[in-house]
Image: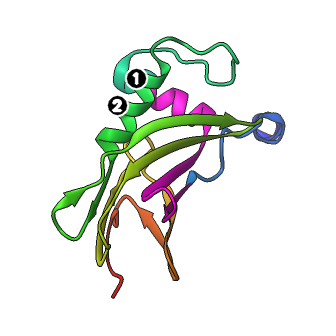
Amino acid sequence: MLTIHFLWFIALFFTPPAHPVHVALTSIEYRNENREFNVAFKIFWDDLEKVIAEKYNVDLKLEKSDENPQEKKLLDKYIGENFRFVVNEDREIQLVYDHKKINETAIWLYFKGSCEELVQKVYIYNTVMMDMFGDQTDLVIFKYGTFERGILLNTKHYEINLKLK
């Protein structure tokens, strides 16, 4: 019996964990000079590969420099299905994939969306990676002029309503 416990201890101690926590960051910032919102998602790239494989049955290799021809389309589709951004109750901001940056653990996905009008209210729906991990948490940082808020989202709380004025 002691041998079995010892083997379990050795297996747990020497087996690297996947990710002990599932966290992401979403940054939404208005650029007045361009009259657009820049939206950036920071996600563990291996987790993003898993969710793309599960949902769309495509094996992306995001860490490779030579991009899969479907990559842009799949990333755009995934974000589009899991993230909505509406201003002033009736104007949905249409995000366009811009580019990505990747390091040893995370990927930054950059999107842009034009907005000519003065923003007074914001609605954000964000379930990015929450369809894959029940313990997923996302820190959303929203900046518009001098207004700035940080909000934590999870699988039970994934919508934000903000009044700016």
Residue sitting at 45 percent across and 21 percent down?
A: 53
The magenta-colored residue range is 25-52
Q: 18 or 44, which lies in front?
A: 44
| Residue 100 x, y percent position in the rendering | 60, 35
Residue sitting at 36 percent across and 83 percent down?
A: 164
Could one spot residue 55 in this view of the protein? yes
**What is the quadrant of the N terminus in the image?**
top right
Residue sitting at 42 percent across and 62 percent down?
A: 154
CB of mark 1 within 8 Å of CB of mark 2? yes
Could one spot residue 136 in this view of the protein? no
Q: Amino acid at mark 1?
A: Lys
Left or right: residue 47 versus residue 74 is right
Q: 90 or 135, which lies in front?
A: 90
* Helix, strand or loop under label 2: helix
Q: Is residue 27 magenta?
A: yes
Label placed on residue 77: 2
| Residue 91 x, y percent position in the rendering | 21, 59
**What is the quadrant of the C terminus in the image?**
bottom left
Where 164 sits versus 69, above or below?
A: below
- Which residue position holds label 1? 73
Instruction: Point out the residue furthest to the bottom here.
Output: 165
